[in-house]
Image (tube, rainbow, N blue to C red):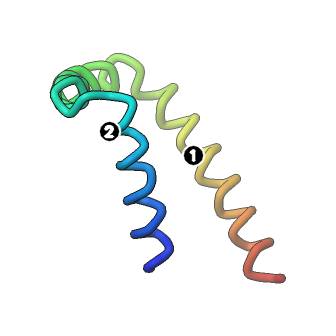
Amino acid sequence: MSLLVVLGAYVGARLFAVVSPITLAFVVLLSAFTAPKAYEAKQEEVDRVLAAAKSKLDELGAKFKDK
């Protein structure tokens, strides 16, 4: 858990070093309103891709647990 916190803090610091907080807030706000509409339009494709990604992650997780 602490590794995730450190990684999240690092990524956040690097992101804020490259992009201003105002720009980041604008992108988050814009995404919050456009992502649901895009999901409605492409729901079947998005669900298919997410299912494939989840199966790959589960497969990799099983390999990692075995070692």
Name the residue beneath numbered marker 2. 16
| Residue drawn at (44%, 68%) of the image | 6
- In the image, is 49 to the left or to the right of 13? right
Q: Where the N terminus falls, by quadrant?
A: bottom left
Of marks 2 and 1, which one's residue comes earlier in the chain? 2
Name the outermost residue toward the right: 67
Q: Quadrant of residue 21?
A: top left
Name the residue beneath numbered marker 1. 51
Residue 58: where, in percent of width, then height?
Answer: 66, 63
Q: In front: 9, or 38?
A: 9
Q: CA distance from mark 2 to mark 1?
A: 32 Å
Mark 2 vs mark 1: give the one in front: 2
| Residue drawn at (62%, 46%) of the image | 53
Q: Quadrant of residue 31?
A: top left
Residue 38: where, in percent of width, then height?
Answer: 32, 19
Name the outermost residue toward the front: 17
Judge the density around disc 1: few (<14), some (14-19), many (≥20) Cα neighbours within 10 Å: few
Q: Quadrant of residue 36?
A: top left
Q: Name the amino acid type tagged 2.
A: Phe
| Residue drawn at (41%, 59%) of the image | 8
